[in-house]
Amino acid sequence: MGELTHWKKLENPDYLGAYALTPNQDLIVQIKSVGQEEVYNPSNNKKETCTVARFIDNSIKPMILNVTNCKTISKLYDTPYIEEWTGKYISIYIAKVRAFGDVVEALRIRNKIPTIKQFKCEICGSIITGTNSKTAEEIAAMGKSNYGKELCLKCAKIEQEKMKKEQEGNEVK
């Protein structure tokens, strides 16, 4: 049998849940923002204010953070301030927890900062960092694809200008 599909994936919930991960899988994400949002709760048909984390990779659904997960992030990065969590990496996994008189699957954040492969700019040597829309890996790959080298955004822009001038010079001849 091929890959199994969790039934909740068919429901298309708006937020990340245990259904999105396979057993023993960790999902490593970079935080884009954390804030309070109005969230619809289908179990009581009401909206409630929740703490929600959004991620740099927009293909990953936002995650509702409970107190346990907020405390874990706070301890990991030694800051209780959600604004300082932006750009930080977390590793999400499935844990079985007691809730509402039952044992259920829940998302938890590992109590360890994930190891992330770092990419260095091949021109200036600086560490390539992600943006609000692209991960460091995507930026490095774009540099490699466009200019033959893994480049930070600053050096990629310089290379782009050089190529543009070269093309303009070739057109004049």
Image (cartoon, rainbow, N blue to C red):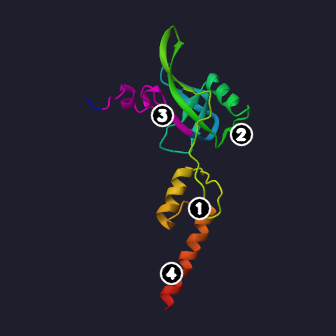
Judged from this view, the residue extending furthest toward the left is 1
Relative to 104, say whether 84 is above or below: below
Please tell me whether mark 4 sits on a helix, a strand or a loop.
helix
Crowd tier of the residue under label 2, counting other residues whose Cα lies within 10 Å: few below 14, some 14–19, many 20 or above: some
Relative to 99, say whether 158 is above or below: below
Q: In the rendered image, which residue does mark 3 sit on?
A: 14
Q: In the rendered image, which residue does mark 2 sit on?
A: 84
User: How far is mark 2 from mark 4, CA to CA?
Assistant: 43 Å
Q: Nearer the viewer, mark 3 or mark 1?
A: 1
Residues tagged 3 and 1 counted as in contact (Cβ below 8 A):
no
Give 48 or 145, whichever is nearer the viewer.
145
Please tell me whether mark 1 sits on a helix, a strand or a loop.
loop
User: How far is mark 3 from mark 1, CA to CA?
Assistant: 39 Å
Instruction: Please report whichever mark, 3 or 1, sits nearer to the chain's N-terminal start.
Output: 3
Q: Position of residue 100 (x, y in %)?
A: 52, 11
Residue at horizontal 66%, vertical 57%?
A: 126
Q: In the rendered image, which residue does mark 1 sit on?
A: 122
Crowd tier of the residue under label 4, counting other residues whose Cα lies within 10 Å: few below 14, some 14–19, many 20 or above: few
